[in-house]
Amino acid sequence: MDFFTWALITAGFAMAVGSLGTGLGMGKAIASAVEGVARNPGASGKILTTMMIGLAMIESLAIYVFVVAMIILFANPFTDQVVQVLQTFAG
């Protein structure tokens, strides 16, 4: 496989792992917040505020993974060097 194929595979794998992790984290955070509100409805304001801040932090991880995947695909700083090395080996 050539360099660009590996870049596509790497970007896809990074997005899959990043999305899986953030999805599981968000699900656990929401489940815990709902459980906390069910146990103590009077604290729902503080719980929901803290949950929203936590969800924003978790979502930032998915955005960082997306940015890195886009860098791998479109603005890879090593593209010229890799293509040059491949051309050297190819002949």
Image: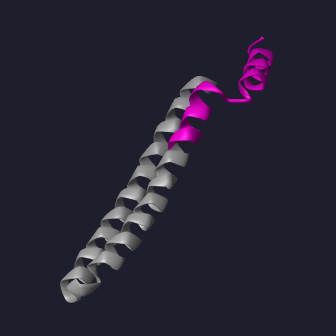
Can residue 87 be seen here? The reply is yes
Q: Residue at x 31, y 65 (%)?
A: 27
72 lies left or right of 26: right
Is residue 78 within the magenta segment?
yes
> Dividing the picture into quarters, in which one does residue 75 lie?
top right
Q: Is residue 54 above or below residue 17?
A: below
Residue placed most toward the observer, 5 or 77: 77
Q: Which residues are magenta?
A: 66-91
Residue 17 vertical placement versus 73 (above, below): below
Residue located 56% across and 39% down the image? 67
The residue at 38%/64% (across/down) is: 52
x 76%, y 21%: residue: 80
Say left or right for 71 vs 77. left
Q: How is the image coloured?
A: one colour
3 vs 83, left or right, is left
Query: Which secondary structure is most common in the magenta stretch?
Result: helix
Q: Is residue 33 magenta?
A: no
* Quadrant of res 1: top right
- The C terminus lies in which quarter of the figure? top right
Where is residue 87 shown, x and y percent of the image? 76, 15
Front-most of residues 44 and 9: 44
* Residue 6 seen in the current view: no
Most foreground residue, 76 or 67: 67
55 above or below 6? below
